[in-house]
Amino acid sequence: MTDTFKLTGNFKIESPPSIVPSDAIFNLSGPLYESFSVLKKFGQVVTLDADGAEVISFGDVAQAHLIILKSDQPVTIELTSALGVFQMLPGDLLVLKTLDVPITAMRLTRAAGIATTARLILAQKTP
C-alpha cells in the first residue's frame, strides 16, 4: 500500500470592504489540490541550540520532493537541488513541492542567540 500526500483547500487574499471596487482586481483566491504517491517519508523535530548552519538529516529519503517546515522562530533555510542550485530562504513556515527537481540537502540556521525548534516532514515521490 502506497502513502499519498494531499494538500487541499483554498487560498484567499482580499482587500477590506472600504476599498473602492476598481481595486478588487487585486483580490486573489483559488482552490488548492496537490497530490502525489509517496515512496518514503521522514519526520523529525530539530532543536537549533547553537549559532551557525545545521545540516538536516533526510533519514532514508534520498531526494525530497516535498518539504514541510514549521519553526517557532524565524530560520534561514538553505536548500540544494538535484541540479546543484543553492537557495536561501528566510521564514518560519515552508511548504515546498518540487516533483521535477528534488531537494538533496538542507541546512537550517537560527537567529543568533535564539533557541529555535523546527518540525520537518520530508517525502520522496514514487517513481
Image (tube, rainbow, N blue to C red):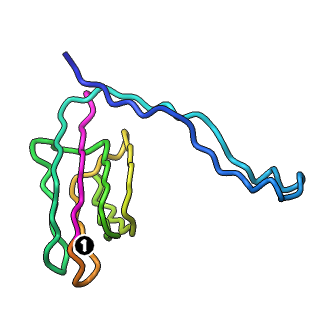
- Residue in the image at 80% along x and 53% along y: 17
The residue wearing badge 1 is 109
Bounds of the magenta span? 116-126
Please state which amino acid type lies under the numbered disc 1.
Thr
Looking at the picture, how far across and down is residue 6, in whole percent? 38, 30
Residue 121 counted in the magenta span = yes
How many neighbours does mark 1 have within 10 angstroms: few (below 14), some (14-19), or many (20 or more)?
A: many
- Residue in the image at 49% along x and 30% along y: 33
Q: Vertical placement of 88 versus 18: above or below?
A: below
Looking at the picture, how far across and down is residue 22, in whole percent? 89, 54
Using residue 105 as the reference point, say whether residue 72 is left or right of it: right
The image quadrant of residue 90 is bottom left
Q: Nearer the viewer, residue 119 or 39?
A: 119
The C terminus sits in image quarter: top left
Q: For the stretch drawn in magenta, what is the main secondary structure?
A: strand
User: Residue most toward the left?
Assistant: 60
